[in-house]
Image (spheres, rainbow, N blue to C red):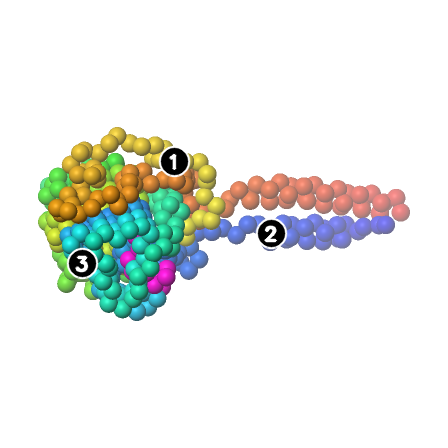
Amino acid sequence: MRISATAAAAVLGGALVLGLTTAPVALAAPGTPADSAGCTTNAFGIAGKYGEFVLGDDVHSPDAEGAVAVGGNADFRGGFSVANELSAAEVDALPGRASLVVRGNLLNGSSATVVMKGNAVVGGKVSDRAVELHSGTFSQKADLIDFDAEFAKLRSYSSALAGEPATDGAKVTISGGRLTLEADNATRNVFHVTAAQLEQAKDIFLKVPSGATTIVNVSGGTYDMEKAGTTGFFLSEGQNFVLDDKLQSASGGTVRSRLLWNFPETRTITKSSKAAWPGSVLAPRAHLELGTAAPINGSVWVASLHGSGGAETHHFPFTGCLPEPGTTPSATPTPSDTPEATPRAENTPSASVTPPPASGTPTSDTSQPATPGEPAASPSTTPNAGGGGDLASTGSSGTVPLVIGTAVVLAAGTGLVVAARRRSKRA
């Protein structure tokens, strides 16, 4: 069979076209602006539906405006109400429509635990006083939420977010007791700060476009807002700044609803009782000490929690658009899974954190509390070498086989052309 030079060239061209069309499609690289392909508003899954999502023990009063899920014991002996600000659609979206979930025991003492909207599900015992429900039902079930699996995902995702590079042009400026975070990407802005930098700030200013998602990655083992006596968080509204509080916020609350504070390594966070803290707090290894006054205006996802008085969690769910979580995380544990030095005693949740029971209150029904900051049954994962962790990354590894294949096709095509010409001469 004779093959003309023209035919050989056609074969070669077709092979090259085939090779180019089978190259892998590049996904959004970490740090690129969010778009419909590389961005999700549901990065936290089940945890994102709860205003307080706690792996271990939750010792809190007097209320949380959103839904509350506790993987250890819930000590609400100071009185507690849940879910007053939830919409009907938000209640329907909860697992089992349960706005209060306690995997362990619920301690009420002589005070009421009131569920304003939705159901209550408790895995262990309820001490002294039954849960009061306004529109839902009570049931006993310990496995409605797999807290260990959910926190394994949160730890992995927190580490991946920490690998996101800072946004081009993002500025972190410290001047006296003022810390300013400034960036102008209209879609997503990423900052990297240390806990030590935050601890110098009496006032914190955030200047970003109102529609943008903001990620503040904070490194360090502990963060104590009381060190500087932080009194205010100011969010930008055009050229002005608004002191955040429940009844006032920049751009009608748009900035804080898309603001995420990410603490991938931190084991203890102490909030100043003088400052309302805007945005949601992702600290899946940390004990959160809320203090005795001033709220968090957002959701919290933490290993354990203690707060009282005005230190509430207000129902301002996170609505930012974050990089898609990966589907095949690495099995290699991160170094941060190794327990760090024990935090200072005054910040360490322990039996002393829990208020002593009232006289005559039984304590034998309290199961062993989870160790704060050490929830792990499932190991967290190591971010990839590009720093993106489990986030979608640009696929470049497929280009090597493509180059090799192209070279082979070129060589084969050249051989066909030469052979065709020799046969033509002999003929």
Q: Secondary structure at mark 2?
A: loop
Q: Is residue 427 left or right of residue 19?
A: right
Distance in Å between CA atoms under marks 2 and 3: 63 Å
**To which quarter of the image does residue 187 belong?**
bottom left
Labels 2 & 3 near each other (Cβ < 8 A): no
Q: Amino acid at mark 3?
A: Ala
Between residues 249 and 134, which one lies in front from this camera angle?
134
- Is residue 20 placed above or below 97 in the rendered structure? above
Q: Is residue 251 left or right of residue 137?
A: left
Q: Is residue 95 magenta?
A: yes
Residue 372, percent across and down? 27, 40
Between residues 224 and 345, which one lies in front from this camera angle?
345
Residue 186 visible in the shown view: no
Looking at the image, which residue sits at the far front?
360
Residue 112's disc number: 3
Q: Bounds of the magenta span?
A: 93-102
Mark 1 vs 3, N-terminal side? 3
Looking at the image, which residue sits at the far right?
427
Q: Which residue is mark 1?
A: 334
Q: Residue at x 42, y 45 (%)?
A: 390
- Is residue 131 placed above or below 89 in the rendered structure? above
Callout 1: few (<14), some (14-19), or many (20+) C-alpha neighbours within 10 Å? Answer: some
Q: Amino acid at mark 1?
A: Thr
Q: Which residue is mark 2?
A: 22
Between residues 324 and 411, which one lies in front from this camera angle?
324
Callout 3: few (<14), some (14-19), or many (20+) C-alpha neighbours within 10 Å? Answer: many
Mark 1 vs 2, N-terminal side? 2
Q: Is residue 41 left or right of residue 352?
A: right
Q: Residue at x 34, y 56 (%)?
A: 140
Q: Amino acid at mark 2?
A: Thr
User: Which dot, 1 or 2, sits closer to the camera?
Assistant: 1
